[in-house]
């Protein structure tokens, strides 16, 4: 199956089936809907609540429910979780030091998924911000197959997680019958020579597109990094990176602000010194532009042209 | 001794104990703590709260969220006396190896959540109340907030939510001492009277003298037992720094701290046993 799907739809589809089997699952939405939400609203009306445009209360209510034993999912536009950052910090990070709270924050609209809505909807700070919170796992799936695995993660592991979901329909990069194991932290999609691209989310698609276009001219490795917090197995990732001389991080978020670039730099500078590290991403200014996603990437020198130039050395 | 006299006597002891803790750990916001003494004393000693001191997370317990965390140190002498933890720990308050911090947190047996930051308790309480209803439980969720705390938008999000979802097992107690840090609330946001606003959100509201255990007990009993789909609020009219004249008359009492010598004098002169 190569159906293009949004991560949201794949997740809601799986969540519906899970809610049928597990009566401890609860879904809160901050007034965000989807056609695939309707069956959940209809058939599990006692375990779905639209809290209204009130993200702070959504996190507070989610916390209370989780403390009563529920496995809670929250759904909101990615940028709008930031208004609830203190609640996320106090209840899901700080209080988890004493007792974990099982809340999975589905953040819809990673990066510039909402490319036409202007910078109020561009979520570029969240990787750095959420990475700074202890006890919150930051998950950044690259496709809907990976995204669906979040549900098993939520049911099987304690604590909270922030899940950065793309807003657009994308093709699957992983086989549905062989989904990645999220707790592995990353997948090696291509093994290569000389240079390795470490990309996350939508950027994994861009990386593969560029690599395929350049054909035999370059032989880079491509890593799909899907856990962005410090919870993955560092030796495994380091072993995957060790054979390369140049590492290129590629994210739909600000660089130099604690994102993937900093995560890889921190690891590599201590354990694999001597690598060349190139970071592509958004350059730290907001784009007051409506345009295609690729246009926004070009404005920030992290699109196909920029990546091609890095790969070919031109 | 009848229950009301018992509660008055107990509250006086709790007030003295709380002040003693402040002498050991001057970071304790004593004025904020003193206005809530009768509220916590009546709640825990009024014979209406379900709990098990040897099993602080017993599922059958009523939940209590001390949302005005910085002002909830009266819970330390109350909880220790009831057996939640060894009273010997009180002497170690605010020291590095004690679970008794200057602001109560969830490390303390009997304290549900960590609330140094205000405005969160009501929303969390809504989640608990909702969860309890789904589970078919009859437990109540009590949240103690300050009136300054009612400045926060997140509180009103919870107020609207609780009303809409008919969380009749949610009881909000407002320690209405009329002062926040930088002075009188009436000179800051002028939200009083709070009762009108809560009633507008379709809550059941009761106004009581927050230092009178008789009125508090009656209101708490009503709040617990009333057959009514609305969440309930008790506005406890209190005095910040109650029991110490210098605090009661000071609009900036929030930041006032006393030395151990001053505490000894205050205990002898203003709060004799």
Image (cartoon, coloured by chain):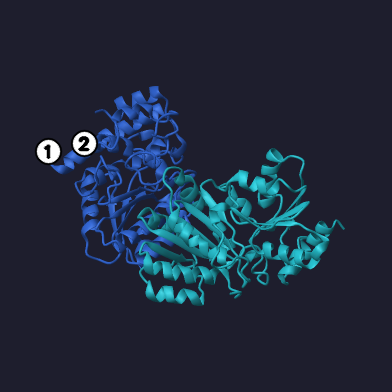
Chain colours: A cyan, B blue
| Mark 2 touches mark 1? (CB < 8 Å) | yes
Residue ID at (51%, 62%): A149
Query: In the rendered view of the protein, which quadrant contains the N terminus of chain B?
Result: top left
Q: Residue furthest left?
A: B1
Provide residue B269's location: percent of width, then percent of height. Answer: 30, 26
Per the model, the C-alpha gap separating discs 2 and 1 is 10 Å
Which residue is the extreme one toward the top? Answer: B261
For mark 1, what is the residue? B1
Q: Are marks 2 and 1 on the same chain?
A: yes
Q: Position of residue B36 (x, y in %)?
A: 33, 43
Q: Residue at x 45, y 33 (%)?
A: B27
A118 w.r.t. B101: above or below: below
For label 2, the residue is B9
Res B95 label = none
- Name the image quarter holding residue A156: bottom left
Q: Would you identify the image quadrant in which residue B201 lies?
A: bottom left
Q: Nearer the viewer, residue A275 or B233?
A: A275
Along the viewing direction, whichever of B154 and A72 lies nearer the viewer: A72
**Nearer to me, B133 or A55:** B133
Relative side of A198 to A217, left or right: left
Of all chains, the one bearing label 1 is B
């Amino acid at each position: 199956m190569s159906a293009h799907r949004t991560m949201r739809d794949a997740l809601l589809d799986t969540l519906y089936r899970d809610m049928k089997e597990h009566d401890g699952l609860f879904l809160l939405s901050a007034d965000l809907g989807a056609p695939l939400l309707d069956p959940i609203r209809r058939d599990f009306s006692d375990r779905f609540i639209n809290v209204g445009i009130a993200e702070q209360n959504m996190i507070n209510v989610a916390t209370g429910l989780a403390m009563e034993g529920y496995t809670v999912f929250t759904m909101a536009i990615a940028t709008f979780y930031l208004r609830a950052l203190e609640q996320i910090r106090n209840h899901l990070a700080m209080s988890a030091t004493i007792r974990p709270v099982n809340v999975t924050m589905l953040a819809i609209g990673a990066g510039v998924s909402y490319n036409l809505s202007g910078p109020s909807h561009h979520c570029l700070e969240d990787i750095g911000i959420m990475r700074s919170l202890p006890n919150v796992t930051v998950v950044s799936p690259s496709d809907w197959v990976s995204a669906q695995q979040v549900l098993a993660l939520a049911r099987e592991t304690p604590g909270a997680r922030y899940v950065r979901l793309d807003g657009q329909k994308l093709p699957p990069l992983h086989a549905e019958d062989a989904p990645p194991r999220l707790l592995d932290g990353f997948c090696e999609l291509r093994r290569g020579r000389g240079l390795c691209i470490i990309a996350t989310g939508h950027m994994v698609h861009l990386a593969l597109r560029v690599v395929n276009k350049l054909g035999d001219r370059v032989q880079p490795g491509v890593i799909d990094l899907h856990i962005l917090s410090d919870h993955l197995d560092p030796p495994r990732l380091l072993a995957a990176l060790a054979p390369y001389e140049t590492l290129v991080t590629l994210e739909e978020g600000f660089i130099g602000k604690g994102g993937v670039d900093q995560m890889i730099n921190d690891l590599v500078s201590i354990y694999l010194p001597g690598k060349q590290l190139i970071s592509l991403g958004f350059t730290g200014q907001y784009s007051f532009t409506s345009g295609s996603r690729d246009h926004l990437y070009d404005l920030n020198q992290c699109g196909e042209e920029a990546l091609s130039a890095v790969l070919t050395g031109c | 001794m009848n229950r009301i006299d018992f509660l008055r006597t107990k509250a006086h002891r709790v007030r003295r104990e709380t002040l003693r803790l402040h002498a050991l750990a001057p970071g304790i916001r004593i004025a904020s703590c003193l206005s809530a003494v009768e509220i916590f004393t009546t709640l825990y000693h009024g014979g209406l709260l379900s709990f098990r001191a040897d099993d602080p997370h017993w599922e059958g317990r009523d939940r209590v969220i001390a949302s005005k965390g910085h002002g909830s140190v009266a819970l330390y002498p109350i909880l220790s006396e009831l057996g939640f933890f060894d009273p010997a720990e009180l002497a170690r308050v605010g020291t590095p190896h004690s679970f008794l911090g200057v602001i109560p947190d969830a490390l303390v047996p009997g304290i549900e959540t960590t609330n140094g930051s205000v405005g969160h308790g009501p929303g969390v309480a809504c989640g608990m109340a909702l969860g309890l209803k789904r589970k078919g439980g009859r437990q109540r969720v009590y949240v103690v907030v300050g009136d300054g705390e009612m400045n926060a938008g997140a509180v009103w999000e919870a107020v609207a939510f609780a009303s809409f979802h008919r969380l009749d097992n949610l009881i909000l107690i407002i320690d209405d001492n009329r002062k926040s840090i930088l002075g009188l609330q009436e000179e800051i946001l002028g939200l009083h009277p709070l009762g009108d606003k809560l009633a507008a959100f379709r809550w059941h509201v009761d106004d009581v003298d927050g230092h009178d255990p008789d009125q508090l007990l009656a209101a708490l009993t009503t709040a617990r037992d009333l057959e009514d789909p609305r969440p309930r609020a008790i506005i406890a009219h209190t005095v910040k720094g109650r029991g110490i004249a210098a605090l009661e008359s000071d609009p900036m009492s929030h930041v006032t701290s006393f030395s151990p010598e001053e505490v000894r004098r205050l205990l002898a002169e203003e709060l004799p046993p």
